[in-house]
């Protein structure tokens, strides 16, 4: 396995963005396309060899053994990829305001606070003399807006902005594999806040401000009496350095690249997407809290686990033949209906068919992909003493219906795809996965100027 930890400790981590076309915390922080000036392949190789010699790294675990391999590792593992922060806090909230002008001022207050926290320089107070002072905790705060901010579930236009509602935004429907306690319409919210940083206490501090002081600041700034926002709770997630989650497989494999053409084609709204003008450079967010039932999973042999996922557990490589597809693309499977490439109901075959031709709607399977930014979570124990853990699944895309919902409804949970009787995704079929919560949101574009604020386009006529 590539020693990513060594490379991480040898390079400064990329920072998040606050100004620009896109909101922070979606496709940033991002490693630069070209290695930064601090990238010294020889120094990195010396560190690896030193650790092998000291017994801290087994030689068979370090496949970077030449200068060329070190250089190539940056291109394959870092160039243009997201450098996710270590922690995420997910807050959902409802707006209690009645007037359009008050909603506008609330969004200004949220932007003001987010700007302060993203740009805040870490305090040196309370640090011991010999303790390293971090340059940054890489804070990003992303805002998503739910369909209920535009219209209530019974169709009432709350603030006179329903004509601005993004084309694909709606409350999340129910899906096969949802928990019996999950009612998506009941859990729908007006706002979602994604708070990320490299230190859990920083997340706690920002969550506390939102929950305890945002209403006070809004009241102070605009003379409003009463609560403007009701917070519905907070979900936490963390990241492992090796990007693996509780099932033991690497969840970062086969994510879309961060090339601008990929982002414009699959993630961010552009002028040709038939969306309201204010949505350009925004993106849709699908949030799902997915439990992974570890006792049932750990009863399986590694061979059976690999068959359910469709990948080799150690390397992450698909259990399939590799072929070159049309137009220079590389599908995973030579024939999506051939079981020689692994079980037809394995997870990756159900969500990544990668056929050689366009589907009935004239869309290539690769154009159904979306950007995943998931974090594992651990919520303690249930009443039976089993761990409550899984994945905070966050996915960004330019069309919920054409990307996420098509993948789930037409492929993953369709028992007759790719052939009749293939069955649904093996992870759901065997109750390894269970969806506990979730929602659909639209993330507005970034800030166009120092005086701009989140979703300002909603108030332009």
Image (cartoon, rainbow, N blue to C red):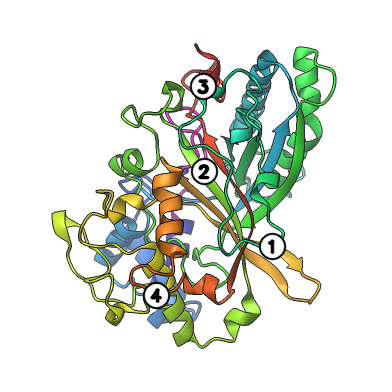
- Nearer-N-terminus badge (2/3): 3
Instruction: State how far apart marks 4 and 3 are (Cα).
Output: 42 Å
Residue linked to disc 4: 422
SS at circle 3: helix
- Nearer-N-terminus badge (4/3): 3
From this view, report whether residue 305 is shown above or below residue 225.
below
Question: Which span of residues is magenta-colored?
Answer: 10-26
Q: x, y (%) of residue 292?
A: 61, 69
SS at circle 2: strand
* Quarter placement of the N terminus: bottom left
Foreground of the two, 154 or 83: 154
Q: Residue at x 58, y 64 (%)?
A: 177
Q: Residue at x 27, y 61 (%)?
A: 72
Label number found at residue 285: 2
Is-magenta flag for residue 11?
Answer: yes
Foreground of the two, 414 or 311: 414
From this view, report whether residue 421 is shown above or below residue 190.
below
Label number found at residue 163: 3
Instruction: State how far apart marks 1 and 2 are (Cα).
Output: 23 Å
Instruction: State how far apart marks 4 and 1 are (Cα).
Output: 25 Å
């Amino acid at each position: 396995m590539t020693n990513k930890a060594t490379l991480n400790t040898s390079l400064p981590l990329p920072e998040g963005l606050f100004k620009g076309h896109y909101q922070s915390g979606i496709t940033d922080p991002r490693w630069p396309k070209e290695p930064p000036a601090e990238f010294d392949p020889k120094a990195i190789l010396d560190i690896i060899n030193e650790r092998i010699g000291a017994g801290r790294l087994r030689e068979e675990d370090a496949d970077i053994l030449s200068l060329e391999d070190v250089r190539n590792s940056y291109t394959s593992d870092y160039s243009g990829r997201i450098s996710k922060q270590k922690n995420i806090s997910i807050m959902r909230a409802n707006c209690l305001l009645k007037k359009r002008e008050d909603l506008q001022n609330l969004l200004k207050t949220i932007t003001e606070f987010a700007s302060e926290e993203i740009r805040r320089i870490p305090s040196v107070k309370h640090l011991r003399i010999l303790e390293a002072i971090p340059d940054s905790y890489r804070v990003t705060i992303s805002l998503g807006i739910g369909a209920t901010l535009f219209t209530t579930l019974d169709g009432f236009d709350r603030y006179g902005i329903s004509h601005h509602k993004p084309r694909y935004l709606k409350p999340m429907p129910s899906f096969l594999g949802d928990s019996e306690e999950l009612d998506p319409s009941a859990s729908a919210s007006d706002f979602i806040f994604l708070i990320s940083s490299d230190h859990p206490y920083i997340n706690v501090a920002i969550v506390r401000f939102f929950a305890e002081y945002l209403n006070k600041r809004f009241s102070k700034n605009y003379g409003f009496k009463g609560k403007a926002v009701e917070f519905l709770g907070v979900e936490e997630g963390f990241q492992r350095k090796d990007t693996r989650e509780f099932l033991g497989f690497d969840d970062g494999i086969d994510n879309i690249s961060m090339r601008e053409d990929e982002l414009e084609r699959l993630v961010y709204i552009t002028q040709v997407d038939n969306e309201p003008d204010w949505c350009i450079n925004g993106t849709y967010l699908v949030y799902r809290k997915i439990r992974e039932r570890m006792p049932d999973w750990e009863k399986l042999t590694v061979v059976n686990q690999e068959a359910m996922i469709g990948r080799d557990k150690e390397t992450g490589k698909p259990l399939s033949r590799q072929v070159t597809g049309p137009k220079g693309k590389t599908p995973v499977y030579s024939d999506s209906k051939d079981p020689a490439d692994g079980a037809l109901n394995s997870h990756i075959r159900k969500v990544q068919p990668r056929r050689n031709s366009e589907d009935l709607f004239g869309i290539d399977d690769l154009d159904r992909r979306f950007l995943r930014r998931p974090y594992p979570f651990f919520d303690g124990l249930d009443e039976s003493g089993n761990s409550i853990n899984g994945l905070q699944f966050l996915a960004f895309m330019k069309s919920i219906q054409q990307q996420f919902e098509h993948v789930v409804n037409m492929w993953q949970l369709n028992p007759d795809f790719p052939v009749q009787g293939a069955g649904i995704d093996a992870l759901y079929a065997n109750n390894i996965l269970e969806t506990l919560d979730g929602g659909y949101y639209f993330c507005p574009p970034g800030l166009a100027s120092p005086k701009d604020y989140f979703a300002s386009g909603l108030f332009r006529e």
